[in-house]
Image: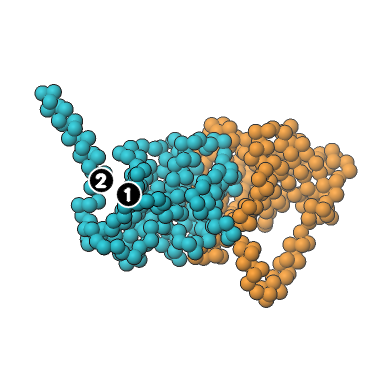
Chain colours: A orange, B cyan
Amino acid sequence: MQNKKDIALFYYQNLFAKSKLLIVLLFPVFLSFSLLPQSDSFKAVNQSSILIQKLDSFALSLKTIRSDFTQEKHISVLEEVIISKGKFIFRRPNTLKWSYYTPINYEIALIDGKFKINNDGRTSEFDINSNKMFAEINNMIVSMVNGSILTSKSFDVQLFESNKQYKAVLNPRQKDFKRFISEIHIFFEKSDLMVSRIRMLEASGDFTLISFENRTKNESIADSEFGFKN
Amino acid sequence: MTVLKKLATILIILSISLQSCFHYHAAFKQVEAVNVKPVVFSDSFEKALYKTNIQFLNKEYSGLMFFKRMNETHATRVVFMSEFGLKFFDFELLDNGEFSVKYILDELNRESLIGVLEQDIKLLFQTVQGPVERKYYFHENKAVYLEKYRLDKGRYYYFFDEKSTKISQIEFTGSVFKKIKIILGDYSNGLPKSIDIKHVNKALKLQLRLVK
């Protein structure tokens, strides 16, 4: 673990142990964390069917999305967070690409019914339907991004709101699916109705949080951008 | 003719089995005990993150492998997850050698695979246990030490770089058909930059690269 910055692991315990100065310096950061909407600051939405309609029709108006993302994998027992960063592009109805550039180089694109992978220069591709698990994950990701997940029959949906956000809590109906993801939280910004965060919880207590930053919508995205550079 | 055939067969079998026994001895000269430690991750090891590819039965699983030694119990946890964060498996290895599966994806939940991974993890994180016959060798041209352990269940070969005295290779030979070879790259702050694990007669290959 020679380069802590680059490896991008949070050492929570060490952080607190090291010095009070650090805590003082980081106080604004803690403050901003505490200002992040906590689950208890969300209250149930009264007429959720109207909101679902609103979010759904907005999602239909989304032709493209371009965004940076930060992915945090929280491993609860180990008290560790593994952080990955990258870029995300989406084009309606179901073409998308995740490009991770830290801590590792990895790209996964969904295009023409295929997963295409660029694993540090080694490329491979396979049909989405060749693997049941990947097909499920793909359906979920695409429907989360294009908004159709709220009307999906695979989930029970509950809606909550805070001052700035809507939160959709999705419970998978299929037992098979629940084994690896027990609950999904999707956060929409009230200001632009775009998805800003997705949290996927596992039965073990681990969760993955994906935050979308610098989001833009409906810019044209060329076919070539879904390909790989090398 | 048949006698010749039998003789030839015996010779072939002999040469195969002898090769695995004496393969290293030809170029190595036995020496007195040297100051080397047959463990890749030292006692002070805390955690490490590796970009990892696992090839198993013509399928490839890629992602991140995270090793952590727990403070209180000193247990080693091995978590392998996809780039998306989907967990493939989570293993625990206790100090006393007890190994447990905390989680494994259904698709990978095969006893044969888990058993092999257990052995690999033990080779990386534990020293050889039990009554052993231990010998040391030195290879002048390659400037490597070889430490050989002989147990009832097989032989362990540890190759050490002469200067750094770090392990560069581990081999375990259980029988002609059971062989594990682990090649370790240069070390950075006590962690091997790369770990390549091959299994003879098993459709399993692991490739780990220290994340920077």
- Image height check: is B92 above or below B5? below
Q: Residue at x 80, y 41 (%)?
A: A158
In the rendered image, the residue lying farthest to the top is B2
Give x and y (percent) for residue B83. 56, 48
Q: Residue at x 76, y 66 (%)?
A: A31
Mark 1–mark 2 Cα distance, whole angstroms, equals 11 Å
What amino acid is labelled 2 in the image? Cys
- Image height check: is A2 above or below B131? below
Q: Nearer the N terminus, badge 1 or badge 2?
A: 2
**Nearest to the observer: residue B32 or residue B161:** B32
Q: Secondary structure at mark 2?
A: helix
Give x and y (percent) for residue B62. 50, 45
Give x and y (percent) for residue A108. 55, 45
Q: Residue at x 35, y 40 (%)?
A: B178
Badge 2 density bin: few <14, some 14–19, many ≥20, Cα 10 Å: few
Report the side of A63 relative to A191 (left or right). Answer: left
- Image height check: is A165 above or below A137? below
What amino acid is labelled 1 in the image? Arg
Report the side of A107 relative to A189 (left or right). Answer: left
Q: Nearer the viewer, mark 1 or mark 2?
A: 1
In the rendered image, the residue lying farthest to the right is A46
Report the side of A53 relative to A178 (left or right). Answer: right
- Label number found at residue A132: none
**Which residue is disc 2 drawn over?**
B21
User: Do marks 1 and 2 share a chain?
Assistant: yes
Q: Tell me the chain of label 2.
A: B
Q: Residue at x 41, y 57 (%)?
A: B39
Q: Is residue A1 visible?
A: yes
Q: Is residue A60 visible?
A: no
Q: Secondary structure at mark 1?
A: strand
**Which residue is disc 1 drawn over?**
B150
